[in-house]
Amino acid sequence: MTKYARYEAHGEIAYGIVEGEQVTQITAAPYEDYEVTDHAHSLDEVKILAPVVPNKVVAIGLNYRSHLGGREGPKVPEPFFKTTSSVIGTGENVIIPKDAITEGVSVQPEAELSLVIGKTAKHVSKEDALGYILGYTCGNDMSARDWQANDLQWWRAKSSDTFTPLGPYIVTDLDPSALRLIGRINGKVVQEQVTSDLLHDVPTIMEFVTRVMTLNPGDVVMTGTPGRPDNVKEGDVMEVEIAEIGTLSNPVVNES
């Protein structure tokens, strides 16, 4: 198991390997050939950034049995896109857009296990799927519900600026079917489920998506959210925790 971070130190952005409370710089992104340097920092000396800069973010809808609320689930994974411009890291503000505030739009976080692709994936079989994944991170699929329900497309409901928090780290060699996913608002648990509750598991998602779309190294796949998320407002703090990975934490502010 290896834990990777993307971080800023002394004005420089780098990737590194996290061990304990220290991060040691590597010479390239973790999905590329890299060497480990002798340049290390204490974690409290650096700013942890979004763990990857993806070319695309593919998210899967209605993919936990506990999220369906008795509805029949989709027969196949149901992907949609979130823009890369909406990606932020742990500690950064999630900003509720002015229009959402004016229109009284309900905004909710969605705690999600997210995959970081490690090598080019096309026509991947379920049996081989996990070999194309570099590792796993926490994701928060922020959702403006009224826009999601009433717009023709989910472009602003899911991809308003700051609506895709990811992090804090990428961790390799985890079993994606046996992770406990927890979502909190102001310290209160509002979502909690084991990833074995996924309607379509990670290998199925990988096989389905790569039938028609190439996933490139650094791309992110968000696998769905469990239960019933709750609303957030300015001043709230949201957390997504997977113990093996860490806690993704983001405050909520209104666009000024």
Image (tube, grey):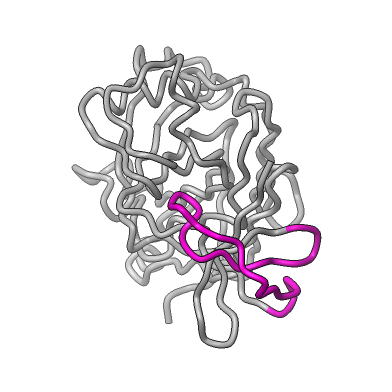
Farthest right residue in view = 20
Q: Position of residue 116 (x, y in %)?
A: 47, 44
Residue 175 occupies quadrant: top right
Residue 207 occupies quadrant: top left
Residue 41 placement, left or right of 66: right
In the depicted view, which residue is nearer to us: 99 or 77?
Answer: 77
Q: Locate the N terminus and report the quarter of the image it occupies.
A: top right
Number of marks drawn = 0
Indicate whether residue 30 is drawn in magenta.
Answer: yes
In the depicted view, which residue is nearer to us: 27 or 105?
Answer: 27
Residue drawn 33% across the image and 27% down it: 78
Residue drawn 66% across the image and 37% down it: 181
In the depicted view, which residue is nearer to us: 197 or 134?
Answer: 134
Indicate whether residue 224 is drawn in magenta.
Answer: no
Q: Position of residue 46 (x, y in %)?
A: 65, 77
Residue drawn 65% across the image and 59% down it: 17
Tell me which segment is drawn in magenta: 19-45
Q: Note whether 242 is above or below 164 in the view shown.
A: above
Farthest bottom residue in view = 10
Q: Locate the C terminus and report the quarter of the image it occupies.
A: bottom left
Q: Note whether 42 is above or below 150 in the view shown.
A: below
Q: Note whether 152 is above or below 194 in the view shown.
A: below
In the depicted view, which residue is nearer to us: 50 or 182?
Answer: 50
Q: Position of residue 90 (x, y in %)?
A: 59, 63
Q: Position of residue 135 (x, y in %)?
A: 55, 41
